[in-house]
Structure formats: structure tokens, C-alpha cells
Amino acid sequence: MESQAVRAAMVRKIQGQGITHPGVLAALQSVERHRFVDSALVNQAYEDTSLPIGLGQTISKPGVVARMLELLCQGRSDKLGRVLEIGTGCGYQAALLSHLAREVYSIERLKGLHEKSRENLRWFRLSNLHLLFGDGMLGYPKGAPYAAIIAAAGGNDIPAAWIDQLAVGGRLVAPAVTAAGRQNLVVVDKTPTGIVRTELEAVLFVPLKSGVA
Ligand code: SAH
């Protein structure tokens, strides 16, 4: 498979959806998504669709990943500082983040996926990416404060630990259930004068669960 060309087509499609951040587009062009899915699904790796990654979880649609990363990087052309990702899954978004941030901590609660992501990512040799096994609802205090926090699983609300561990000037992007009872993308900015929460479009992410398994 000439994956460079297929990825370029995926990136053009994502640009067509309105994504413009050069760093995000470059990361999407560079990271080989087909290395994160089972061999039976490789042909679908560059379609704008979510795919099963085992243990009932999914790798998010590239278009949604791009949207969230663009929100995270909005208004900045330099790299983000330390970033926390909740829900490593297969490791695809973690690999993208390692291109966009100086340091990435990515935490997964399912041992099987934590190990799978380590295997998937070995080939990429990303020295600024730290894979952690644990309950991401508690965040990861050792790496705090974070310039950015991103979650790939949605709960009823944004855990307080995430907001605590966000740096002033930092931004959090996560799916969460809103007053209307639907799951929407939520952006939380921690400004010097307080927390600003913005609810965006409806999304469909796997549930955020507590504890490890
Ligand atoms: N970014 C991932 C998406 C994986 S789906 C990728 O590119 O593949 C979301 C992941 O969040 C699942 O693997 C699920 O197990 C994990 N998850 C759910 N609740 C969690 C929690 N409290 N802490 C850490 N990971 C969690």
C-alpha cells in the first residue's frame, strides 16, 4: 500500500471539513494510522471512520481526532508544553500528540490496550511519549500542571482532577454529557480570572470508566 498518498487524500478530506492548523495537518500526514489497526482492517485505516481496536473500544474517526487536536492547538503556532491524554487506546492519537507537544503523558485503564499501544508505538520511537497504565479519571498529578488535556472517552462530567491539573492558560478538550443529556465536545479554558467552559457539537465516544481492568 502506498500509504503516503492514501494519507494525503485523508488529510485533504479533513481540510475539506475545515481543519487548517498546519501542525495538526502535518502530524496527520506523518503518522501511519494503518499501524494501529488489526491487519484485517488495514484497508479501512484511512477512511474517516472509527474502527474496533479490541476490548470493546474504538480508534476515533480521523476527522474527530483532527477537530479535537485543532481545538487544543488553537491560536498557537509553537509546540504545546506538557500534555495529558486520557484513553491511550491503540496509541494513534498519542502518536499525533507527540508531534504537537514537547512531552506527552497518555494513560489507559485497560491493561490489554495499554500493552497493545506500547507494541504499536515501538516502531515510531517517540522519546517524548510516556505510556501509563491507570485510572485517568484521577489525571496524572506527577506530570501536572498540563498545558493541555485531551480525553477520548466521555463521562457525565469533566472530572475535577483534570481541571485541577490544568495549567493557568491551559485548555482541556473532552466529550461529556451536557444538560440536554447528549454527549458533546466540551472545551475548558483555565484563564487567570477563572474557568471558561464552552460546549460544542455532539459527538459519540466510548464511556469514561473509573478503575482499571
Ligand atoms: N485515542 C485513542 C482512542 C481510544 S478509545 C486511540 O487513538 O485509539 C478511548 C479509550 O479510553 C479506551 O481505550 C478506554 O479503555 C479508555 N478509557 C476509558 N476510561 C478511562 C479512564 N478512566 N482512564 C484511562 N483510560 C480510559
Image (cartoon, rainbow, N blue to C red):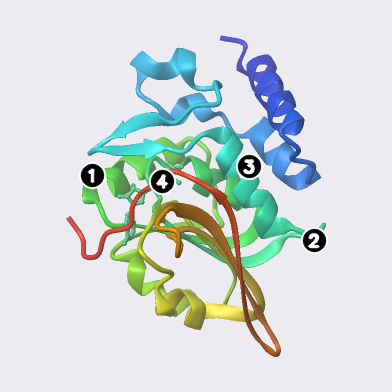
Q: What amino acid is at disc 2?
A: Arg
How far, Cα to Cα, is label 2 from label 1? 35 Å
Instruction: Look at the numbered disc 4 and give the secondary structure of its residue.
Output: loop
Q: What amino acid is at disc 3?
A: Ala
- Identify residue for label 4: 205
In x, y percent, where is residue 120?
40, 36
In x, y percent, where is residue 168?
65, 83
Q: Tell me if the residue at label 1 has its CB under 8 Å from ligand 1.
A: no
Q: Nearer the viewer, mark 2 or mark 1?
A: 2
How far, Cα to Cα, is label 3 from label 4? 15 Å
**Earlier residue among tags 2 and 4:** 2
Q: Nearer the viewer, residue 38 or 184?
A: 184
Q: What amino acid is at disc 1?
A: Gly
Residue 4 is at least partly visible in this image: yes
- The single residue placed furthest to the bottom in the displayed view is 193
**Earlier residue among tags 2 and 3:** 3
Locate residue 17: give its quadrant: top right
How far, Cα to Cα, is label 2 from label 3? 15 Å
Instruction: Identify which residue is drawn at 51% across, 49% down.
Output: 94
Instruction: Look at the numbered disc 1 and give the secondary structure of its residue.
Output: helix
Residue 144 is at least partly visible in this image: no
Locate residue 176: give its quadrant: bottom left
- Identify residue for label 3: 66
- Identify residue for label 2: 76
How far, Cα to Cα, is label 1 from label 3? 26 Å
- Identify residue for label 1: 112
The answer to whether the residue labelled 1 contacts the one labelled 3, judged by CB atoms less than 8 Å apart, is no
**Earlier residue among tags 1 and 3:** 3
In x, y percent, where is residue 12?
74, 25
**Earlier residue among tags 2 and 1:** 2
